[in-house]
Image (cartoon, rainbow, N blue to C red):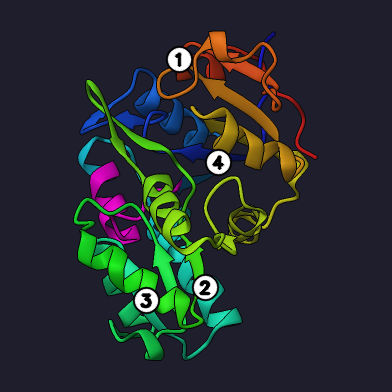
C-alpha cells in the first residue's frame, strides 16, 4: 500500500535512521526530500546516553540534517517531567554521564544517602554495579519513588544489542518488591505529548516511523498517529501476527516513504 505524505514526520533513531555510526538505507535521501517539500521533522529516541546536542552532532556527522529543537530523547523528557511533578527532588541515578549532566544542569541534587533521596532514576546504564543496586534498594526501602527514562529491553548495535534500561528497572524492582511509577520513554503518552507540542501539529497529520512495535508503533498508535514500521532494527515481519499493536504500514526500508504521490495538506 503506497504511503501518502504527512505534514509531520517523527523518526526513531537507533535501528530506524542509523545503526551504530552508519545511516540506514534511505535515511539521507528521505530526510532531504521531506525537508525540500517543507514537511516538519522530529527525531525521537529512548536512548538517554547522549544529550540532545550530542544527537544533533551524531546525525549531522552522518549527513542527516538536524536542529536542536527537532530532537527529543528520554532524558530531556524526564527532566521536563521532574521539573513539573517533583521540583527540588533529590535524586539517585542509575544512569550514565549524559543523563546525570542534564539532571544536574536542571538544578536537581544527587545523593547516595538513603534518607535524603526522594526519587531513584533507573536508566540505560553500562556502568551499573552492585553498589548502585544497593543504594537504590536502601533508598526505596526508606521511601523513595522509582521512575525511569525508558522501557527498552535492549539497544540495537551493529552485530547485536546491549542490555537496556528494562534490565536495570527489573533488578531494582526484584529486590525492592516495588514497581516503577513512571516511565517517560516510548510508548509513554508523556513522550508523545512532548513531541506533539514541539511540532504543533495534531496527531492525525503526523507519521511515526520506527523499528519497534511495542515502543515506537505503540506510542504513535496510542497518540492517534499513523504509524510505519521499518524492518531494519528490532521488530521483524514474523513478529506481526498476533502482536497486540499493529502498524499502519510495514516497510523493508525508508525508501518506501518516498514511493507515493502527495496528498493535500489539511
- Tell me if label 2 and label 4 are in contact, CB under 8 Å: no
Dot placed on the residue nearer the N-terminal end, 4 or 3: 4
Dot placed on the residue nearer the N-terminal end, 3 or 2: 2
Q: Secondary structure at mark 2?
A: helix
**Residue 192: horizontal and vertical position, in percent?**
63, 52
Which residue is rendered at x = 35% and y = 59% of the image? 52
- The residue carrying pointer 3 sits among few (fewer than 14), some (14 to 19) or many (20 or more) residues within 10 Å by Cα, namely some
Which residue is rendered at x = 31% and y = 60% of the image? 51
Which residue is rendered at x = 45% and y = 42% of the image? 152
Q: Secondary structure at mark 3?
A: helix
Q: Which residue is mark 1?
A: 253
Is residue 188 something one can see in this rendering? Answer: yes
Q: Identify which residue, 183 or 70, lies in the foreground.
A: 183
Mark nearest the camera among 4 and 3 is 3
- Residue 10 is marked as 4
Q: Which residue is mark 3?
A: 138
Mark nearest the camera among 1 and 2 is 2
Distance between mark 4 and mark 1 Cα atoms: 16 Å
Picture quarter containing residue 233?
Answer: top left
Is residue 108 something one can see in this rendering? Answer: no
- Residue 80 is marked as 2
Distance between mark 3 and mark 1 Cα atoms: 47 Å
Dot placed on the residue nearer the N-terminal end, 2 or 4: 4
- Position of residue 71 in the picture relative to residue 52 (left or right): right
Distance between mark 2 and mark 4 Cα atoms: 20 Å
**Magenta run includes residue 49:** yes
Dot placed on the residue nearer the N-terminal end, 4 or 1: 4
Mark nearest the camera among 2 and 4 is 2
- The residue carrying pointer 2 sits among few (fewer than 14), some (14 to 19) or many (20 or more) residues within 10 Å by Cα, namely some
In the image, the segment drawn in magenta is 45-59
Amino acid at each position: 500500500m503506497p504511503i501518502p505524505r504527512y505534514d509531520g514526520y517523527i523518526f526513531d533513531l537507533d535501528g530506524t535512521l542509523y545503526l551504530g555510526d552508519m545511516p540506514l538505507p534511505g535515511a539521507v535521501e528521505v530526510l532531504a526530500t521531506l525537508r525540500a517539500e517543507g514537511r516538519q521533522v522530529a527525531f525521537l529516541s529512548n536512548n538517554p546516553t547522549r544529550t540532545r546536542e550530542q544527537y544533533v552532532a551524531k546525525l549531522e556527522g552522518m549527513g542527516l540534517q538536524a536542529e536542536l529543537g527537532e530532537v527529543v530523547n528520554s532524558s530531556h523528557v524526564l527532566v521536563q517531567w521532574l521539573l513539573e511533578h517533583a521540583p527540588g527532588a533529590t535524586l539517585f541515578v542509575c544512569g550514565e554521564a549524559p543523563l546525570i549532566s542534564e539532571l544536574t544542569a536542571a538544578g536537581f541534587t544527587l545523593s547516595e544517602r538513603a534518607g535524603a533521596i526522594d526519587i531513584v532514576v533507573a536508566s540505560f546504564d553500562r556502568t551499573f554495579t552492585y553498589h548502585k543496586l544497593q543504594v537504590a534498594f536502601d533508598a526505596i526501602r526508606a521511601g523513595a519513588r522509582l521512575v525511569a527514562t525508558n522501557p527498552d529491553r535492549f539497544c540495537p548495535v551493529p552485530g547485536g544489542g546491549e542490555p537496556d534500561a528494562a534490565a536495570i528497572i527489573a533488578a531494582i524492582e526484584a529486590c525492592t518488591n516495588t514497581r516503577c511509577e513512571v516511565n517517560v520513554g516510548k510508548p509513554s503518552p508523556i513522550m508523545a505529548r512532548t513531541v506533539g507540542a514541539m511540532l504543533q501539529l495534531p496527531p492525525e497529520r503526523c507519521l511515526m516511523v520506527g523499528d519497534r512495535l511495542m515502543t515506537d508503533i505503540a506510542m504513535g498508535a496510542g497518540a492517534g498517529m499513523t504509524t510505519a514500521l521499518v524492518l531494519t532494527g528490532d521488530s521483524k515481519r514474523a513478529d506481526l501476527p498476533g502482536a497486540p499493536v499493529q502498524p499502519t504500514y510495514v516497510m523493508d526500508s525508508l525508501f518506501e516513504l518516498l514511493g507515493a504521490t502527495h496528498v493535500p495538506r489539511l
